[in-house]
Image (tube, rainbow, N blue to C red):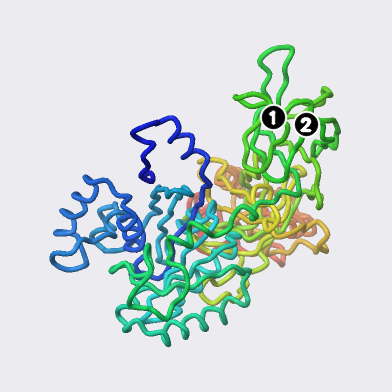
Amino acid sequence: MSHQSDLISTDIKAYLAQHESKELLRFLTCGNVDDGKSTLIGRLLHDSKMIYEDQLAAVQADSVKSGTTGAGMIDLALLVDGLQAEREQGITIDVAYRYFSTSTRKFIIADTPGHEQYTRNMATGASNCDLAVILIDARYGVQTQTKRHSFIVSLLGIKHVIVAINKMDLVGYSEETFNKIKGDYLAFVKTLDLHDIHFIPMSALDGDNVVNSSDNMPWFDGKPMMELLNTIEIASDHNFVDARFPVQYVNRPNLNFRGFCGTVASGVFHKGDAITVLPSSKTSKIKAIVTYDGELDQAFAAMAVTLTLEDEIDISRGDVIIGRQQAAPTIADKFKASIVWMTEQPMTPGRRYLIKLATRSVSGSVSMIHHRIDVNTLEHHDANELKLNEIGSCNVAFNAPVVFDPYNRNLTTGSFIVIDRLTNVTVGAGMITGDASAEEWSQVTAEERATRFGQTASVIVLSGGNAKQTAYHLERKLFDTGHAVAVLEHANDELAMAIKNVGLLCLYLNVKPPAADLTFDCGEYSVDDIYAALKNHNLIH
């Protein structure tokens, strides 16, 4: 709901223009289960008079059957927890978005789930946020989930954090408790990239320090949450020094016009600026900056515009136009990144995916997992795969060079999503941490080959009168199920071992070399029997 204004009844166009020009702040709430995230948002909307009468009436009715605040009290969490499962369990499962505004700002709130199994939901909700509100239950202090959420907030580059120490009414509004939790949290985040941190003691249920300052905590001289949300500085968060413009669409309505459409990712472009197109490195100058409302003299971060150039050069979707800058982007076919895995099927190195970086989609794969990060303890563990909701530091390799910046410098050209090539489902999201092309190469190991091919390299001897027919039938079955296999008809032990050493399955006919891994008499075993035996011996996966 929008901020109430007299202009609504007197001059609706002026009101809409005023509303459109307000600065937008996106923020998320996160914390432990039952810390009061949804209640805080409900209280924020309720005390700010930003709930429609019919909404409030519906929540009052629902509070009777689904509320958790006791008889006769309205459960404000129901304003946000809209799924039936959420109301039944009293928890947040999916990311819920709410929109409201004040006289100075527009807001989008993302209420994210606290459970570990919904880490991907939280990462999705946090990906576009400027600020994070991390709730801590004053009774329990800094918990494991508090640390996990703080790490994810840091990982996603959110620059502003409000630590809301909630349920102060249950600890007698104790200043000592507040100071202890504040000290514990600051000690933990020394290892994280979080700098602008604000602490607020509050009771979301009773409204203390949410919209209005609390009479129960006169010792706290800071701003209540609503005032802080209205005044915290976010304009300087954008990168205005490195001009980046990923081309989304080439607009060619007639022979006399060719424009390159997209959203300015960072920096400022001026009419007449010299530009370079990457990765081709062709150069030109900006002839005009075109919008629906007419031409502009300049365009800056987050503006959607069309650029026309003085020269006819080849530019297509996925190219990046760069202008004035302090740091040049990197052009390479690999980089290092932190990846959040978002699907049930684990991510394994070598598997091919479609990777979308800004407006460009390129085939690629994770070539190496350096380590998996325990989101609860921040410890690093060796890993050969990433499972659902796990986060790892990885190298990503591409079939063609891509243009990128580190995520901490440019959120648009420093982030990417991983897409399954068959289902077109987004299975992962990543933040680029640096260039991996300068890293020393190492020999391909047997373990890497096994991961790439989904099998353990082996020499399998087939004997009997119909061994040849069985071998080629088995080869087809293995090939059709995604395995790399070769049939060797004539005795050549060195060749058999060479086939094995490059990670393949070698079906060796009518001989028994010293290094045979399995032997089958084709008079006793059918193709299906041999295939099942290979699975039972974990030679194929």
Q: Could you tell me the amino acid type at mark 2?
A: Lys
**Residue 269 falls in image quadrant:** top right
Secondary structure under tag 1 reads strand
Q: Which residue is mark 1?
A: 296
Q: Left of 125 or right of it: where is 215?
A: left
Q: How many marks?
A: 2
> Is residue 376 positioned above or below 317 on the image?
below
Q: Which residue is mark 2?
A: 271
Which residue lies at the image location 72% right of the left edge and 47% below the top edge? 398
x and y percentages locating residue 8 in the rendered image: 36, 36
Q: Could you tell me the amino acid type at mark 1?
A: Leu
Secondary structure under tag 2 reads loop
Q: Left of 67 or right of it: where is 208?
A: right
Which residue lies at the image location 29% right of the left edge and 54% below the top edge? 79
Q: Residue furthest top?
A: 255
Front position in the image: 346 or 130: 130
Tags 1 and 2 in contact by the CB under 8 Å rule? yes
Which residue lies at the image location 75% right of the left edge and 49% below the top edge? 241
